Amino acid sequence: MDYTIIVAGGKGLRMGGDIPKQFLPISGQPVLMRTMQRFHEALADVCGTSIILVLPRDQQDYWQRLCKEYDFRLPHQIASGGETRFHSVQNGLQLIPDDEQGVVGVHDGVRPFVSCDVIRRLYDAACTEGAAVPVVPVVETIRQLLPEGDSQTVDRSLYRLVQTPQVFRVGLLKESYSQPYREEFTDDASVVEAMGHHITLVEGNRENIKLTTPADLRYAEALCQ
């Protein structure tokens, strides 16, 4: 069995409203439902996936009301969010049996536009390589800040922007998340990399942005059209 852990712990503060951003509607449907449906669509006819949704405890009743309101029946389990994203993923992993031999993807709940093709390629790569993350080229010029207060241009061709889902063999990710939390764990790949495991890069899709600001929502509405 393969799994998808969708982490949705945002407060939505930069959106300027009271509703957490993962629950905001895009073209008539909450962001989080669109995200979950994308994984079902991508994997249902290939390997199937068991979806685990990680939500803060104080948002779970609201989510259940939304599911009734929108008649959202996609099967999923719910785990409670933790103090940090690291701890939230830990809680999601606890719902996967320790002897599971499949792969698991971890995805941001507010990235509803990852392509089905990217999802499939990531799950395939994780099956063979153990760890796969989506990346896109850097198109802007990058300057590095130097210790003495100056800066310098660096070769952007040597860098990539990292997205989710990040996909791993279940055993590898579970073992990696048994480590104590460290501040430098900025994503799942950094946790796995700390165990000495190689990370395979897979080309992502640029539309797969993380919805954070009101401008992102306007872009999302345009994508839906």
Image (spheres, rainbow, N blue to C red):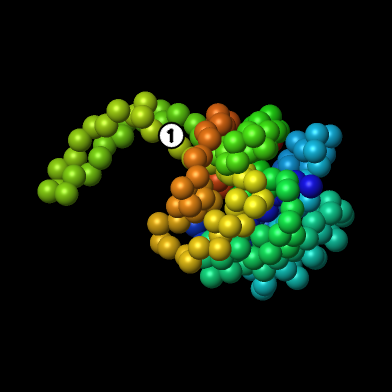
Picture residue at 67% right of the left edge, 73% below the top: 58
Picture residue at 50% right of the left edge, 63% below the top: 179
Residue 55 as seen in the image, left or right of residue 188: right
- The secondary structure type at the circle numbered 1 is strand
In this view, 66 is above or below 163:
below
Residue 155 position, x and y percent, is: 30, 28
What is the residue that sits farthest to the left in this orientation? 148
The answer to which of 51 and 68 lies nearer the viewer is 51
In this view, 69 is above or below 153:
below
Q: Amino acid at mark 1?
A: Arg
Quadrant of the rendered image containing residue 160: top left
- Judging by the rendered image, the residue that carries numbered circle 1 is 160
The answer to which of 156 and 121 lies nearer the viewer is 121
What is the residue that sits farthest to the bottom in this orientation? 58
From this viewpoint, is residue 143 visible? yes
Residue 92 position, x and y percent, is: 67, 61
In this view, 175 is above or below 169:
below
The answer to which of 222 and 107 lies nearer the viewer is 107
Picture residue at 31% right of the left edge, 34% below the top: 142
Picture residue at 73% right of the left edge, 41% below the top: 38
Quadrant of the rendered image containing residue 61: bottom right
Q: Residues within 10 Å of mark 1 (few under 14, many from 20)?
A: some
Quadrant of the rendered image containing residue 21: bottom right
